[in-house]
Each structure stands twice: as C-alpha cells, then as structure tokens.
Amino acid sequence: MQNVTHYIAVYEVDRAYGGPEEGGWYFDTGELVYCEPIAEGTTPEDVQARREALKAEWFDPEARPVHSVLYHGGQYEVTVSEGMPVPFYPAEIPRYE
C-alpha cells in the first residue's frame, strides 16, 4: 500500500450570518462531502487534472451563487490539502473587527 499524504476534498459551500455589526456581515463556510486520497508519487499535473475533473463533475450550472438570497445549496469548492481535510470550515466562527 502506498503512503498517502495529500487529499483532494470537495466542500459544499454556504454563507453564514456573522452578526449585525456595520449593517450585518456574512462569512463563507464549507462542509466536506467527498474526499479522495492522492497516492505518493502522483505528479502535480495529475493532481491538477483530477481536481479539474472533480470540479466539472460537481459543477451545477443551475445552482444560484452563494451570495444570493435564493441560494439553496449546490455550489462546491475542490481543494487539495496536506493531511486529512477538515470536516468543516472555518474551524471557528470569525469575529467582526
């Protein structure tokens, strides 16, 4: 079995209400919906090609933009991470400053 140190992760993105300061503010969130290990020795070009293939696979042209009040899910972000990807982001709710 080959060592795995990196992963390609797919997150469903959303927006969350941060608070009423300065008229209200929002922040982006993500929930892990798919994770794929990258085998040691995989070339950066192969990783990028797989990332692009997953982006195309998860892309929904009918989904509304995340910042729209009519957004109802369906937007995804594909990332490459060193180590296991986090199940949600951000890890802590940001504070308005």
Image (cartoon, rainbow, N blue to C red):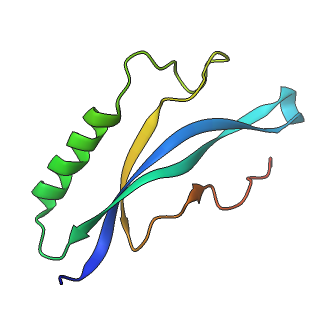
Q: Nearer the viewer, residue 96 or 10?
A: 10
Rendered view: 83 above or below 91? below
Tell me if 85 is positioned left or right of 57 in this view.
Answer: right
Rendered view: 34 above or below 22? below
Q: Nearer the viewer, residue 23 or 29?
A: 29
Q: Please tell me which residue is depicted at 63% across the width and 55% down the height of the picture.
A: 90
Tell me if 87 is positioned left or right of 17 in this view.
Answer: left
Q: Please tell me which residue is depicted at 46% across the width and 65% down the height of the picture.
A: 85
Q: Please tell me which residue is depicted at 51% across the width and 18% down the height of the picture.
A: 64
Tell me if 55 is positioned left or right of 47 in this view.
Answer: right
Q: Please tell me which residue is depicted at 24% across the width and 67% down the height of the picture.
A: 38
Tell me if 70 is positioned left or right of 58 in this view.
Answer: right
Q: Position of residue 65 (x, y in %)?
A: 52, 22
Q: Furthest-front residue in view?
A: 1
- Res. 22 image quadrant: top right
Rendered view: 35 above or below 77? below
Image quarter (top left, top right, bottom left or bottom right) of the N terminus: bottom left
Q: Position of residue 11 (x, y in %)?
A: 47, 47
